[in-house]
């Protein structure tokens, strides 16, 4: 049996207990006084058991014992002959006093035990609730490190300390007033939970609760590690695929213009060759054309590898659609395309360079497939208030329904094998997505339509208006 | 007779050689430097009429050279930039470079930029600037296109006047914002583009195919004589 009083009582608790006990004794005394004369006074003494019971259940043995002794003395003073003395005429009265004391001790121990059980049940319930909560939060897939502070705060509540902190891997953070407990699971130390020492910590709670918490953390950490491994393997696989496509392009697409340049230049360089001025100009033109092709290919490869590595990093600003379309037409020296952009179209929020790249690639693609130079149209229109659609249409043979997605694959050349590098549409879609836009093949009765959408920008600040 | 002295700064010997040959062929006298430090020394010893400056140099970068050069010289500077150097290009323009050419470039393009830059220097500013059919009267603050007066808002006019005082010169977003809206602006290129397209609707026949006010993607705008 333990009589341990775990915490020093607060002054307020003592005052309430003392006043309550005194009140209980006074009340019973008044009741006995009222009933005196009707009922034999000695049997009325049993009423004081209520006061002792009340004190022991409410405030514990520390109050029940004084109540028992006081009750005995008061009963003796007021009601037992000779009254108004503490002298006991009858030896039986000692028996009554002893009875009060035994009742006090037994009930207060029973009450204390019930209280302890209830507290322990509550404590276990808190621990179970916390573990369930921790399990749930660790299984959401968020990084464990993001959850640690929340778990530590809740663990502190369970352990009964004002705050606690968890450190994974490495040394525990222990200040002069803190104590660290290792979090161990499966024979390895995951980290430490530390808490300030002034508060006494219940060893049993620590021994019961920490292993459960550690096991949960171990599971979550292992799961996180596995996920990371899977991601790394996936990104390695993807970068491998990029390398393969780049190598394929380099071996074929870069080599042919280089071969043409080397052949033309060495021809010009060779004094033994008898070349007319016309021949020389031809060779020079070959060099110029092929170096342009090389340059386009190199920048395409750069774009596609940036996009596949997720490194497009658009700098998005407000641009009017006519300006974006205009700069693309300007780059292509394109005077044939029919353009229809309404004047009241809201500006779009995109990276101008990337938007220009998209439009140039779409226009080039359209002109390559168009039946005539004048067969390409660009139409812009709002879709709701937050999107603008720019459709690029050509009057060529159109795109097979089966190919509406594969045209956006890098190095896809289709049945005709046409195209600059097979990267144009892949780059266009990549940049569209990087700018929160979309690019897909639209429905059209004749020819092909590619539909590009861009998000509209926030409305311009009027205070800066002219 | 030489058309001028050009300082070419690039750390690639092949590019230096090609540029030197072509510029000599076009009648320029050429001095070369392979680093930013030696470029500043050369420019101080024999002030050139124009500088062609690679952005990516070992040691002192092209942008640094630009900034230090501007501390004591107004010589026109044309920077050479590659795809992917956009930020450095804009930084160099903001640091005082006059124009840029993107690598790989044709020599025709470089020579045209060089001629334009040389032409602009030492030209007195006329009170009425005429570019094609566009007339900007800087004294009366009046603008007309094909003989018809155009109504502009104060900001549109300030913007057009700035372009008119710098015909042919590339103006960066930052430079335009500071000149027109004030020194506290500089990074709000957000709505600058929208105002430029409003201005275009008033002065261009077809705003999607501008002939006067051209966009230099990612860098700024330029008012040009229509071709």
Image: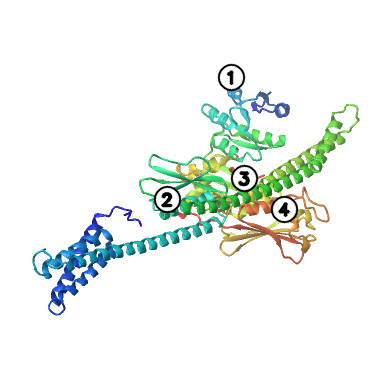
**Given contact means CB atoms under 8 Å apart, are the residues at marks 4 and 1 in contact?**
no
Q: Give the residue drawn at x 71%, y 52%.
A: A426
Q: In this orientation, which residue lies closer to the viewer: B24 or B183?
A: B183
At label 1, counting other C-alpha atoms closer than 10 Å, the crowd grade (few under 14, some 14-19, many 20 or more) is few
At label 2, counting other C-alpha atoms closer than 10 Å, the crowd grade (few under 14, some 14-19, many 20 or more) is few
Q: SS class of the residue under badge 4?
A: helix
**Given contact means CB atoms under 8 Å apart, are the residues at marks 1 and 2 in contact?**
no
Q: Quadrant of residue A289?
A: top right
Query: Which residue in the rendered view is the most extreme toward the bottom?
Result: A38
- Label 4 or label 3, whichever lies nearer to me, is 4
- Label 4 or label 1, whichever lies nearer to me, is 4
At label 3, counting other C-alpha atoms closer than 10 Å, the crowd grade (few under 14, some 14-19, many 20 or more) is some
Q: Give the residue drawn at x 21%, y 60%.
A: A66
**Distance (Cα) linking label 1 and label 2:** 83 Å
- Label 2 or label 3, whichever lies nearer to me, is 2
**Distance (Cα) linking label 3 and label 1:** 36 Å
Q: In this orientation, which residue lies closer to the viewer: A109 or B42?
A: A109
Chain under disc 1: B
Q: Judge left or right: residue A416 versus residue B141.
A: right
Where residue B13 appears, as percent x and y from the top left, is 71, 26
Of marks 2 and 4, which one's residue comes earlier in the chain?
Answer: 2
Where residue B126 appears, as percent x and y from the top left, is 54, 38
Where residue A87 appears, as percent x and y from the top left, is 11, 64
The residue pinned by badge 3 equals: B217
Of marks 3 and 1, which one's residue comes earlier in the chain?
Answer: 1
Tag shown at residue A425: 4
Tag shown at residue A203: 2
């Amino acid at each position: 049996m333990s009589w341990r009083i775990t915490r020093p009582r607060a002054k307020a608790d003592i005052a309430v207990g003392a006043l309550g006990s005194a009140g209980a004794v006074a009340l019973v005394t008044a009741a006995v006084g009222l009933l005196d004369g009707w009922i034999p006074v000695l049997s009325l003494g049993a009423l004081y058991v209520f006061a002792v019971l009340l004190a022991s259940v409410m405030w514990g043995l520390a109050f029940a014992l004084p109540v028992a002794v006081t009750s005995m003395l008061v009963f003796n003073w007021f009601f037992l002959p000779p009254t108004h003395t503490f002298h006991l005429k009858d030896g039986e009265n000692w028996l009554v006093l002893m009875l009060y004391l035994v009742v006090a001790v037994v009930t207060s121990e029973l009450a204390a035990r019930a209280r302890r059980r209830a507290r322990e049940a509550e404590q276990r319930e808190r621990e179970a609730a916390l573990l369930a909560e921790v399990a749930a939060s660790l299984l959401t897939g968020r990084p464990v490190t993001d959850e640690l502070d929340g778990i530590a705060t809740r663990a502190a509540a369970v352990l009964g300390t004002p705050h606690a902190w968890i450190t994974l891997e490495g040394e525990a953070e222990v200040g002069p007033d803190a104590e660290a407990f290792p979090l161990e699971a499966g024979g390895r130390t995951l980290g430490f939970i530390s808490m300030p020492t002034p508060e006494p910590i219940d060893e049993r709670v620590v021994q019961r609760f920490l292993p459960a918490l550690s096991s949960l953390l171990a599971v979550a950490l292992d799961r996180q590690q596995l996920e990371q491994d899977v991601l790394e393997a996936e990104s390695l696989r993807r970068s491998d695929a990029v390398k393969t496509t780049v190598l394929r392009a380099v071996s074929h697409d870069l080599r042919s213009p280089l071969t043409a340049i080397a052949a033309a230049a060495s021809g010009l360089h060779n004094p033994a060759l008898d070349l007319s001025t016309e021949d020389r100009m031809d060779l020079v033109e070959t060099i110029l054309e092929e170096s342009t092709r090389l340059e386009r290919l190199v920048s395409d490869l750069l774009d596609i590898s940036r996009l596949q590595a997720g490194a497009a990093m658009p700098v998005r600003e407000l641009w009017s659609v006519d300006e974006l379309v205009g700069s693309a037409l300007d780059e292509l020296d394109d005077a044939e395309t029919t353009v229809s952009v309404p004047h009241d179209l809201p500006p779009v929020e995109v990276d101008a360079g990337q938007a220009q790249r998209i439009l140039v690639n779409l226009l080039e693609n359209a002109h390559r497939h168009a039946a005539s130079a004048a067969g390409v149209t660009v139409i812009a229109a709002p879709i709701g208030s937050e999107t603008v659609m720019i459709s690029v249409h050509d009057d060529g043979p159109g795109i097979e329904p089966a190919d509406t997605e594969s045209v956006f694959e890098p190095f896809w050349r289709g049945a005709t094998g046409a195209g600059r590098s097979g990267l144009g549409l892949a780059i266009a879609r990549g940049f569209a997505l990087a700018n929160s836009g979309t690019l897909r093949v639209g429905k059209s009765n004749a020819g092909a339509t590619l539909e590009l959408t861009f998000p509209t920008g926030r409305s311009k600040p009027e205070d800066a208006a002219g | 007779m030489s058309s001028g002295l050009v300082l070419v700064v690039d750390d690639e010997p092949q590019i230096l050689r090609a540029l030197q040959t072509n510029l000599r062929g076009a009648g320029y006298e050429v001095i070369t430097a392979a680093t930013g430090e030696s470029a500043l020394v050369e420019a101080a010893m024999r002030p050139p009429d124009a500088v062609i400056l690679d952005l990516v140099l070992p040691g002192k970068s092209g942008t640094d050279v630009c900034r230090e050069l501007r501390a004591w010289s107004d010589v026109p500077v044309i920077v050479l930039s590659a795809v992917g150097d956009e930020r450095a290009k804009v930084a160099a323009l903001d640091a005082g470079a006059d124009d840029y050419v993107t690598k790989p470039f044709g020599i025709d393009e470089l020579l045209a930029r060089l001629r334009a830059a040389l032409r602009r220097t030492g030209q007195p500013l006329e009170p009425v600037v005429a570019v094609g059919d566009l007339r900007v009267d800087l004294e009366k603050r009046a603008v007309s296109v094909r003989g018809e007066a155009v109504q502009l808002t104060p900001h549109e006019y300030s913007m057009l006047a700035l372009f008119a005082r710098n015909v042919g010169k590339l103006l960066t977003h930052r430079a335009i914002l500071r000149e027109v809206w004030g020194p506290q602006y500089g990074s709000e290129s957000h709505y600058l583009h929208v105002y430029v397209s409003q201005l275009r609707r008033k002065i261009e026949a077809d705003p999607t195919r501008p002939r006067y006010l051209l966009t230099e993607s990612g860098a700024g705008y330029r008012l040009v004589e229509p071709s």
